Image (cartoon, grey):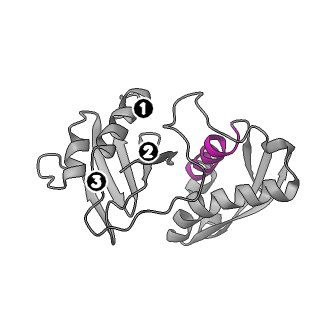
Amino acid sequence: MKVQRTDPTPNPDALKFVLDGQLVTAGSRSFRDRLLCEDPVAKSLFEIEEVVSIFFVSNVATVTKDPFADWSMVAPRIVQALEAHEAPVGAAPARVSAPSSPVLQEGDFQTDTGFFERSYEEKMAFVNSIFDEAVRPGLASDGGGLLLVEIVEKTVRIEYQGACGSCPSSTSGTLFFIENILRSRVHPELIVELI
C-alpha cells in the first residue's frame, strides 16, 4: 500500500495516514497494547518505539505518538512501515479524490500557489471539497456540521451547525484542526474564522 497523504488531527500527537488500499473492509480496529497486538500492520507500527496507539478505519491509519517525540523523525518511519504491507486479500482499492500532499512537517507544504488568483466560485468549491472529504464526515459522526460562509482575502469564514455549535472543543481544537487542514492542502496563509 502507498500513503497518499498525511492529515493533521485535533490532537497534535496524532496524524492520519491515508492509504491507497483498505486496512479494514468494515468497521474499525483500535490497538493500544503492543505486546498483545496480532495485526501485522499494527505490529510493524508498534516496532516504532514512539508509537503509543493505532486506529484503523477503511483506508486510514491514525497513529498517536509519544508527546515528547518529533513528527519529523517519526512520520517517515510510519510511512515506511505502512508501505511495506499489501492491502488485505479481497480488499477493494481505496478511492482518494483530493490532491495528495507529503508527510506534514513544519514549513513543508504542497499547496495551490495560485489559490488567491482563482475566482470566488472556484475558491469556494475547492474549500468545500476539502471540507467534504476531511472535515464534515468527522463532524457528522459527532452530530454536527459545517457551513462555509465566505472567503474574504485570506480568511475562510465558517459556521458550525448542529451539535458542533455548542461544543466547547469546536472553538479550540476543532477550529485548529480545520485551519491546519486548509493550510496543508490549500494554502499555508489561510486563516479560519468562526462566525
* Whole-number angstrom distance, CA of label 3 to CA of label 1: 24 Å
- Residue 167 screen position, x and y as percent: 58, 61
Viewer-proximal residue, 48 or 94?
Answer: 94
Report the residue at 36% width, 62% height from top.
22
Q: Earlier along the polypeptide chain: callout 3 or callout 1?
A: 1
Label 1: which secondary element: helix
Taking the magenta stretch, the answer to whether it contains residue 179 is: yes
Describe the element under mark 2 as helix, strand or loop.
Answer: strand
Mark pair 2, 1: CA separation? 9 Å
Give the residue type at disc 2.
Answer: Leu
- Which one is nearer the viewer's eye here, 66 or 55? 55
Of badges 3 and 1, nearer the viewer stands 3
> Is the magenta region chiefly helix, strand or loop?
helix
Question: Based on the displayed image, in which of its 4 quarters is residue 49 positioned?
Answer: top left
Residue 70 in sight from this viewpoint = yes
Name the spot of residue 32 as percent of width and height, x first: 23, 51
Give the residues in magenta: 173-187
Q: Residue at x 28, y 58 (%)?
A: 30
Q: Determine which residue is flagged by label 1.
A: 71
Asked if residue 94 lies in the magenta stretch, the reply is no
Question: Contact (CB < 8 A) between labels 2 and 1?
Answer: yes
Give the crowd class for mark 1: few <14, some 14-19, many >=20 residues within 10 Å.
many
The amino acid type of the residue labelled 3 equals Glu
Q: Disc 1 residue type?
A: Trp
| Residue for badge 3 | 86
Q: Are marks 3 and 2 in contact (CB under 8 Å)?
A: no
Front label number (3 vs 2) = 3
Per the image, label 3 sits on a secondary structure element best described as loop
The location of residue 116, given as percent across then percent down, is 83, 42
Front residue of 86/52: it is 86
Q: Which residue is mark 2?
A: 15
